[in-house]
Amino acid sequence: MLGFMAVSGIFGLQNLQKLDIAVKFPEEIYCDIPAQLTVQLATKRGILPHYLLTLHLAGVVTGFPIIRPGERKEQKVLVTFSSRGAGTVTRAKVSSPFPVNFFVRSNPFSLTAAYLVFPRPKPLPSGWSSSDPAETRNSSQLHKGSSGETESINRYTGKEPFKQIHWKLSARHDELLVKEMAEETGEPVIINLDLLPGRVEERLGHAAFLINRFMSEGRAVGLELGEKQIPPGITRGHRLKMLGELALYAQD
């Protein structure tokens, strides 16, 4: 019996070794709103599979019944972050009852998975107009055109002018690709954090709400955070940059 227990212990420990853990975060994570993470578990073994694995990471638990040699599996999990700002997942644990379910063994793992949590968007209170904390300047309604910032890369349809063809990317992909440009034809908006109602966290939430709302309407949006100013822009990257500034505001 002791020999059996010893052998099962060896197999149980080996079942938890030579594993790789990775985490993929979505581009947009908002405080107190569930975010879908992708967790990956891969084996570095070339012969035996891993059985009945349970991954514990970022406060959630997900199972991997079997991982075969050379295989990488992933699961989607929902995680809610309770505070805004930058963070890093540094620890994870894998456990398993394999091989005989007498004991549940576990093995800790170290990793570095950085993420950024934006303030939760918060509509303005009743009686406040979205124009109250915003200053409008010049033109900005978003339409596809041949001027402005590059919005996306798409296949050439024959309708676009040759000057929009992205020759370097086209050469790498063996097909013609064009730059879809964003043309400005309305009034840009500058959101001033100091003019928003409420305490700091409420104002940050209002600013996140206004950024997403105005840009979904095709408006160019800029941001003023005290002495820091971000000029209006219309791209997704610009929107994420402003939300990132809100996430890190006054956290030094």
Image: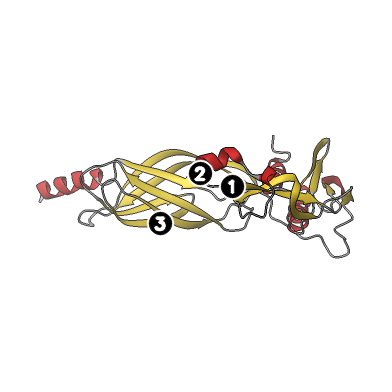
Residue at 44 percent across and 50 percent down: it is 39
Q: Amino acid at mark 3?
A: Thr
Mark 3: secondary structure: strand
**Foreground: disc 2 or disc 3:** 2
The quadrant in which the C terminus is found is top right
Q: Residues within 10 Å of mark 2 (few under 14, many from 20)?
A: few
Nearer to the camera, 140 or 154: 154
Side of 220 where 167 appears, left or right:
left
Q: Position of residue 181 (x, y in %)?
A: 71, 48
**Quarter of the view holding residue 141:** bottom right
Lower sequence index among marks 2 and 3: 3
Residue at 45 percent across and 41 percent down: it is 91
State the separation of the CA atoms marked 2 and 3. 38 Å
Is label 1 in contact with label 2 (beta carbons under 8 Å)?
yes
Q: Which residue is mark 3?
A: 62
State the separation of the CA atoms marked 1 and 2. 8 Å
Mark 2: secondary structure: helix
Q: Which residue is mark 1?
A: 177
Q: Which residue is mark 2?
A: 173
